[in-house]
């Protein structure tokens, strides 16, 4: 038998670097996908069309030299652990239209897709929430990226035409419908982020240090509390803590503006989020800042911000109408400034991972 699954990428409307701090996030699965085909085999192997690489692997505890293969190996290994028995080998083929390193969570899409597929094909019977939890553990413990659980939850449990208000402290999810929502555009800077080699893990460490010095978790912190501890925190940790506190507030305000269909105010929250990620959390880059500044010049753009872990990737834009001529203008200005080709495309809100074919 041959089984094919599609696993979406995700956007996060607002709430960046709050998920691993027990905060609020507001993601959704999108209609850009990783496609995974599973077939019985006499050995475990994976072929990625994007890299034109075929790599065999065993289910031991060691990593492999080809970095992307560790996501696949870790996913299969952790499902086997959850099943409590050996699983028969599979040949896995990876394809799709989800850009890599663009801040759309291609890693979580791959992890969740492989885990969901193995669970279905080999009869593990894992729930979507269990798969999200295991995928999070793989990325943290096997791959070595200390990400939060937002991406995996969005990919595993997303629903068409709905954002997910996730309270990462309590694990609760509330689906917020996207009726009459503005056009969503992703503007890819062409600068690829690498969370393993970038400053992502540094930011996690800084946030933990801020919690240790302040003496309470982030959900109990206020601006007044960290203001009183500013001397002990130092300016860098103070800025990190202030971003997390204010970003949590912006997420909750964003939900209110969506329910009121106040798109201008929602856009202002996105711009404020970007400014905070640039100046307080310091994960933006000049190329991204330039794109956001240009978007502010377009009247029917409500708001924009850097999206994802930072240090490259994409800008999320909400606007009154589809950006066609505007993207052509942006591409020209960006090429003149940085010599990099910019890509932009509208996205819709999708269901989470699902099986699409059996042959």
Image (cartoon, rainbow, N blue to C red):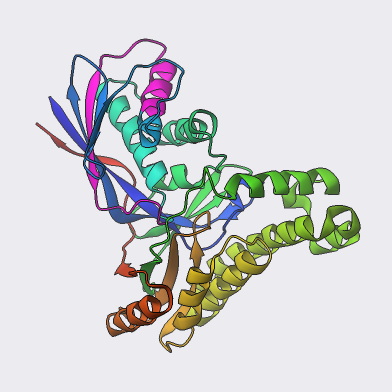
* x, y percent for residue 122: 27, 20
Q: Position of 203 compared to 257: left or right?
A: right
Count every numbered label the image shows and give the total: 0
Query: Which residue is drawn at the image coordinates 24% and 48% (left, top)?
Result: 96
Residue at (46% x, 88% y) in the render:
297
Stretch in magenta: 73-102
Task: Please state which of residues 309 and 88 is positioned toward the viewer in this rendering.
Answer: 309
> Looking at the rendering, which quadrant does residue 83 occupy?
top left
Left or right: residue 321 versus residue 63 is left
Q: Is residue 268 visible?
A: yes
Asked if residue 261 can be seen in this view, the reply is no
- Residue 260: % across, % down: 51, 75
Residue 216, relative to residue 223: is it above or below? above
Q: Is residue 237 left or right of residue 107?
A: right
Quarter holding the C terminus? top left
Residue drawn at 29 percent across, 55 percent down:
32
Q: Is residue 74 magenta?
A: yes
**For residue 120, what is the image quadrant?**
top left
Q: Is residue 328 magenta?
A: no
Residue 275, image x and y in percent? Answer: 61, 72
Vertical comparison of 225 with 152: above or below: below
For this orientation, the residue located farthest to the top is 85
Residues 287 and 204: in front is 287
Q: Residue most toward the left?
A: 359
Image x and y of residue 341, in percent:
33, 69
Q: Is residue 306 above or below residue 33?
A: below
Of the 4 image quadrants, the one containing the N terminus is: top left
Which one is nearer the viewer's eye here, 252 or 335?
A: 335
């Amino acid at each position: 038998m041959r089984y094919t699954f599609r696993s979406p990428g995700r956007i996060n409307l607002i709430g960046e670097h709050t998920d691993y701090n027990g905060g609020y996030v507001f993601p959704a699965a999108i209609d850009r996908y990783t496609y995974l085909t599973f077939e019985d085999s006499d050995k475990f192997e994976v072929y990625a069309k994007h890299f034109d690489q075929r790599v065999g692997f065993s289910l031991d505890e060691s990593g492999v030299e080809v970095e992307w293969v560790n996501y696949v190996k870790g996913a299969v290994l952790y499902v086997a652990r959850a099943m409590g028995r050996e699983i028969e080998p599979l040949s896995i083929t990876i394809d799709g239209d989800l850009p890599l390193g663009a801040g759309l969570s291609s890693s979580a899409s791959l992890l969740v897709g492989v885990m969901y597929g193995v669970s279905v094909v080999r009869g593990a019977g894992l729930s979507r929430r269990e798969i999200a939890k295991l995928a999070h553990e793989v990325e943290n413990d096997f791959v070595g990226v200390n990400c939060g659980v937002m991406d995996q939850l969005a990919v595993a449990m997303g629903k068409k035409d709905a954002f997910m208000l996730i309270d990462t402290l309590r694990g609760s999810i509330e689906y917020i419908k996207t009726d009459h929502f503005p056009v969503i555009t992703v503007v890819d800077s062409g600068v690829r982020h690498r969370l393993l080699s970038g400053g992502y893990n540094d930011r996690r460490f800084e946030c933990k240090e801020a919690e240790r010095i302040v003496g309470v978790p982030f959900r109990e912190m206020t601006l007044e509390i960290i203001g009183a501890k500013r001397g002990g925190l130092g300016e860098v940790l103070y800025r990190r803590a202030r971003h997390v506190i204010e970003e949590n507030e912006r997420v909750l305000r964003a939900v209110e503006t969506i329910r009121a269909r106040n798109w201008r105010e929602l856009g202002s929250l996105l711009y404020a989020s970007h400014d905070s990620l640039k100046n307080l959390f310091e994960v933006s880059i000049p190329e991204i800042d330039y794109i956001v500044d240009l978007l502010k010049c377009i009247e029917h753009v409500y708001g924009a911000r850097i999206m994802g872990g930072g240090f490259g990737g994409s800008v999320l834009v909400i606007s009154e109408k589809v950006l066609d001529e505007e993207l052509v203008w942006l591409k020209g200005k960006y090429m003149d400034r940085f010599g990099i080709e910019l890509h932009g495309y509208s996205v819709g809100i999708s269901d989470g991972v699902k099986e699409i074919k059996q042959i």
